[in-house]
Image: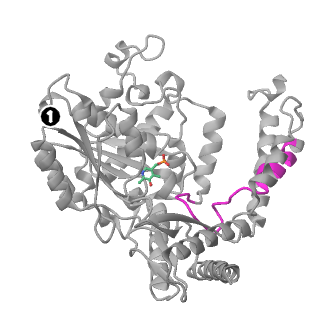
Amino acid sequence: MRSHLLNGLTAEHYRSSVTEGVERVAAKLATTDRPFTGVTVDALTPRVDAIDLDRPLGDTAAVLDELEDVYLKDAVYFHHPRYLAHLNCPVVIPAVLGEAVLSAVNSSLDTWDQSAGGTLIERKLIDWTTARIGLGPAADGVFTSGGTQSNLQALLLAREEAKPDRAGWEEGASPAKLRIFASEVSHFSVKKSAKLLGLGQESVVALPVDHDKRLQTVALARELERCRQDGLVPMAVVATAGTTDFGSIDPLPEIAELCAQYGVWMHVDAAYGCGLLASLKYRDRLTGIERADSVTVDYHKSFFQPVSSSALLVRDAATLRHATYHAEYLNPRRMVQERIPNQVDKSLQTTRRFDALKLWMTLRVMGADGIGALFDEVCDLAAEGWKLLAADPRFDVVVEPTLSTLVFRHIPAAVTDPAEIDRANLYARKALFASGDAVVAGTKVGGRHYLKFTLLNPETTTADIAAVLDLIAGHAEQYLGESLDRAS
Ligand SMILES: *Cc1c(COP(=O)(O)O)cnc(C)c1O
């Protein structure tokens, strides 16, 4: 069994095992003709259930054969140009190489004595990102597991900073008085964070959006004023730079102005829109982000990085102290004086992957412009897709994209019952998934069911979009035809 431990004696076994795995995946990538096989839960479950974990196969090739059957064969492939569903990007090769290196060396980024150079690489990437945002000389941050964790940490810092001086909140006052303002289409992790932070049910105030799904600053100004008059404490405003559904970017300069006026923490959730930080054409869409107190970025959404790769950035490094705890065995206080960089002092996690290496490899091989150009391509593709949809009487499209999502629904010519239109669109999404020809997402707008394309693959063409729209229309029409038959 010791032959399976990765060390100097097993280097050859390591090389051949990993190569075998890489070969399988490469073969898969070269031959998948659809993003999904359409396998059902009922078909796949018995295959997984039948495997006896207490009877190992011993042999790598046999295990890879088995894996083919329970996973690789029927996985959902994000690299396929007709995977158009969620915020999953195809990944770039330098990042996958980084992934292979980081899991083999297996550094843990919590302390210097578990990572050394890894710590410095992560710090340099944090500085690179804060410079791109324009957060100023005192900025800092830390890599996280994802936007959900980044938002949680940002709101933790905001909660701590909302204490006495900053907003006139008496020490010991109830956290029930704290309020977070975010648009009604902000990410649900804001509400989840509020719950985890012990804030009341009323703590997140959902603000209306305008026609373009951007937070209405008039409503924000009104609510901030009301908050103050009611003796409540405005703890944070969460501006979303790239809403999950629409890719809309809240008006950052106006929000920054209001945050300054009311002394409120400004958090920008740029989990999706962060790709614009590298854009060659559309960086100005993020103007105002430089005034944030904290920013969430998900490199695994718009920097073409594998899951997980995300960061929280802050304007003032000192605010990260709210996540600092010292343990004698790990990061004793004296190490701060000794200037030993322990990233755990800034993180909600302890043992932590060296995810930063993936971005490092990417920037060193492709450069930021390489990433930005890919993201620009998908933004341009979305603009083309919007034109297709807007000109097509079979569809209703919600907003002109700022990033790379399209939200639309099929409107059958002969049907007026909104519930029936909902059912036709729900059916079309399911039927498409079951066919495996394409994968699309869905959401609700104004209480009605819509479909969604999240375009993150530069290999997707307008012809792909047109073809998938035809498939959707076909499935919806088929449903309506059958539904007429049922009625008659
Ligand atoms: C995806 C997303 C998140 C959550 O990020 P995870 O990496 O999935 O945890 C937060 N905010 C927005 C706007 C997102 O799109």
Up-down: is 125 above or below 419?
above
Kind of residue at disc 1: Arg
> Camera-side residue: 480 or 47?
480
277 displayed left or right of 220: right
Image quadrant in which you'd find residue 105: top right
Count numbered badges in the picture.
1
251 displayed left or right of 474: left
Residue at figure coordinates x 83%, y 32% from the top left:
53
Q: Which residues are magenta?
A: 63-89
List the residue tagged with mark 1: 166
Task: Locate residue 353, reporting x and y percent.
Answer: 55, 35
Up-down: is 37 above or below 333?
below
Q: Is residue 24 magenta?
A: no
Residue at figure coordinates x 81%, y 41% from the top left:
17
Task: Locate residue 44, reporting x and y percent.
Answer: 79, 51
Up-down: is 262 above or below 54?
below
Answer yes or no: is residue 260 visible. Answer: no
Image quadrant in which you'd find residue 235: top left
Residue at figure coordinates x 13%, y 48% from the top left:
226
Residue at figure coordinates x 17%, y 23% from the top left:
171
Q: Secondary structure at mark 1?
A: helix
> Camera-side residue: 486 or 380?
486
Task: Locate residue 27, reporting x and y percent.
Answer: 79, 59
Q: Residues within 10 Å of mark 1 (few under 14, many from 20)?
A: few
344 displayed left or right of 216: right
Question: In this view, which residue lies farthest toward the top?
Answer: 328
Answer yes or no: is residue 120 visible. Answer: yes
Image quadrant in which you'd find residue 172: top left
Task: Locate residue 417, reporting x and y percent.
Answer: 50, 79
Up-down: is 82 above or below 64?
below
Q: Quarter of the image containing the C terminus?
A: bottom right
